[in-house]
Image (cartoon, coloured by chain):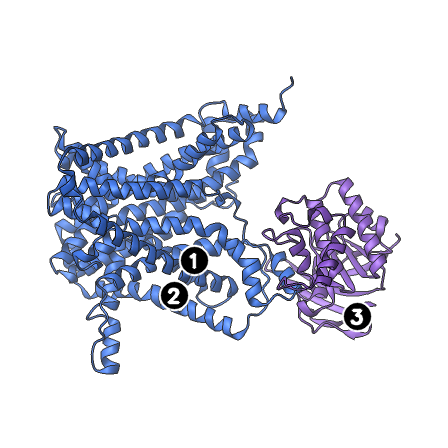
Chain colours: A purple, B blue
Amino acid sequence: MLDLENITFHYEDGTQVADYCFNLSIQAGEIAGITGRSGSGKSTCIDIISGFLSPNTGRILLEGQEIGQLPPGLRPVTVLFQNNNLFDHLRVHQNVALGINTSLRLTKDEKRAVDEALDRVGLEDLKDAPSHRLSGGEQQRVALARSLVGNRPVLLLDEPFSALDAEVREEMLTLVRGIVSDKNLATLLVTHDVNDCHKIADNHYDLKDGAFLLRPV
Amino acid sequence: MARRPALITQTAIVSPGLSIYPGLMVSGLLLVLVCAVFAAIIATGLTQNTALSFDGVGRLLAFTTAQATASTLIALLLGTILAWSLNHRRHFTGRRMLLALLSVSMVLPTIVTALGLITVLGRNGWLNQVHLSLFGEVSGFSVYGIPGILIAHTWLNAPFIARGLLQRLEGIPAERFKLAASLQFSPWQRFKIVEWPALTIALPGLAITVFLLCFTSFSIVLILGGSPNFNTLEVAIFEAVKLEFDLTRAAMLALVQLGVCGLLVMLAASLPQHSSAISPPSLFYMWPDPKLARALQTGAILLFSVALTAPLAAVVIDGLQGDIFKILQDGLFRQAFATSLIIAGLSSIVTIGCALAIAATRRNLGSYLRTRQSNFSWLVGWLISFMGTGYLAMPSIVLGLGFFMIFQNLPIATDHLAPLVLILANVLMALPFALVVFLPAMQKSGRRYDKLAFSLNIRGLTRWRFIDWPTLRSEIGFVSALSFCLSLGDLGVIALFGNRDFTTLPWLLYQNLGSYRTSDASVIALVLLVLVISVFMLLPALFEKRPHAGS
């Protein structure tokens, strides 16, 4: 479904130089877990797929269609970051609604979709709460709810649960697994914790020397 | 019942004593001084013919408020546009220079600014010369009066606002911009949902500060006002003392001024404190703006570059055309130069001492309040907050007036105490700005090292040597330059106490302007400009961390 074909990227910031070459294929409903040391290129890979960085060469294909030329907003991709996934001054349901219409003017059906997404992540009761009042785990649930209403077939998770405690993290991993299966999403999970991969990933890749190495799950 | 460990730790951090009392003593001393000044003004204002002295106060207050409101609104609008433009354009030739110019305009003596603006916008100024060569006649625009006051206040304050807001915008996490890009926000939605919330946190505080600065503006109105119709309270106080010798009227005006400033400072103190919550500049991600937005950004950057550079260039060019050698050899100039340096140097040292003491006390009392909720904690919290901004309520000319009135009743010649008054006024003027820099740094150092310092029993001077000095030295360098420059350029108190034997560079410059020796005034303005820029470049560099000095 999602294919990275010979994606190369050269990184240089004065003190660090790195060269990456990504080749990867993720099927619908599959979670590919990626681990690697700091600076190994995990987030760079996410940034390239989501369009925040342009690769030097290579192609990004979704069901055979090239999406590498599309701007970030038009890519069929949802990204969850470790932090700052919500706009603090907006209410929970508004943050979710952004996934449907950024003007926040929704039809009845769209409002129902927001409610259903919040219900799916267990936050229906908090739909009118200001986002900054939520706990870290609740904020990530809201971001997941937004990915549900967005109906984009690729989900990119950039260490989204690193800041959560063990119990909440476990809940979130289960939730993600369920959502990915329900919606048949091609999912890339970047994490520094191998256990996350063992728990929910279908395939585990280690990013070493700028390239993916397949590891046993 | 067992006490929570956190409570014990936090209380113990506060208990060693040394870290609280210096700040309380400094605050107490300054408070006593301010109260003495206040009492002297009230005593003079209420014991004589009040009704007569109130004549025209309403009109003065209305004009002062109107010009301050208009200046603040214009500065806020332009400052916001510039900050937004600079945040979206992070890579262009001259960006660092423009940022440096923004800082220079904040610390440049206002009288130098006024002189530069007259050269550019005055009747024989550059703009009129261009107009004359293009249209064969000079334009009808006059820099004197309301336009000049508004332009000068905008020139001085829009950069201050832009710096403050730019810091906020640069602190927006990159993820927010990525999220906005991923959700296909329009440029307007990006501004409304991502950038505006970050700006609104800082805008009320900046607006109140700028309003206060414009409300108490003295030099600009004195030089560019042009007519008694455009007098502000501050200038009216000066004229009441120096020209009319009516201390009662001066006191009444000062009380009105203090009332308004006091209300605003209380309002500012009640605003949520966000200074310590500024995030460091985040990794930048910004997708291209549409053409219209880019044109607006380019226009704003160009306009500010020209507007900020032109008056400075005018000061340099005019100064170089004057008889520099003659001025430098002049005894009065040398005396004013030495006095300015000594007063500014001492003011800077005292400001740093006071600000560090108050900042340490606020940090430690803040820790204490977090763990001890009592019925009076809100009052203590408010007082601690007021310690930072409260002095803004006492404009320097009002302070000078108060001391002037106190000295009337003392058997000491005013001249002998004038330097002390000048230093005190400078310290009170620079303290709020110094605290804005020191407080977040001190709180950061506290959060990072308090527990470690307590566990190792590091306190007092040892703590200062190993923890506070290494972590604060950059801030101390910046504040020393800032307070030095602010003191160097003050024209408020010296306007009341200055005479032939005791004069500073700004006062000498004003006297030269008043007696139409504009060529000499231009040279003095150039000297002040060079001094300010040199100090602002050299002093912080002296305090910078040396390699391997440890931190």
Residue under mark 1: which chain is it in?
A: B
One can see residue B210 in this view: yes
In the drawing, what numbered circle is on residue B457? none
Q: Quadrant of residue A115?
A: bottom right
Q: CA distance from mark 3 to mark 2?
A: 47 Å
Residue B112's x, y, as percent? 25, 57
Is A149 positioned to the left or the right of B488 in the image?
Answer: right
Disc 2: CA contacts within 10 A as few (<14), some (14-19) or many (>=20): many
Disc 3: CA contacts within 10 A as few (<14), some (14-19) or many (>=20): many
Please name the amino acid that badge 3 sits on.
Leu
Front residue of this view, candidates B538 and B220:
B220
Residue beneath disc 1: B162
Please name the amino acid that badge 2 sits on.
Phe
Q: Quadrant of the N terminus of chain B?
A: top right
Instruction: Give the residue drawn at x 66%, y 45%.
Output: A134
What secondary structure is marked by label 3? strand
- Residue B252 lies, with reference to residue A59, above or below; the image says above
Q: Quadrant of residue B326?
A: bottom left
Residue B374's x, y, as percent? 51, 25
Instruction: Give the residue drawn at x 25%, y 59%.
Output: B114
What secondary structure is marked by label 1? helix
Please name the amino acid that badge 1 sits on.
Ala
Q: Are marks 2 and 1 in contact (CB under 8 Å)?
A: yes
Residue beneath disc 2: B304
Residue B31's x, y, as percent? 32, 31
Query: Farthest front residue?
Result: A108
Among numbered discs 2 and 1, the one appearing first in the sequence: 1
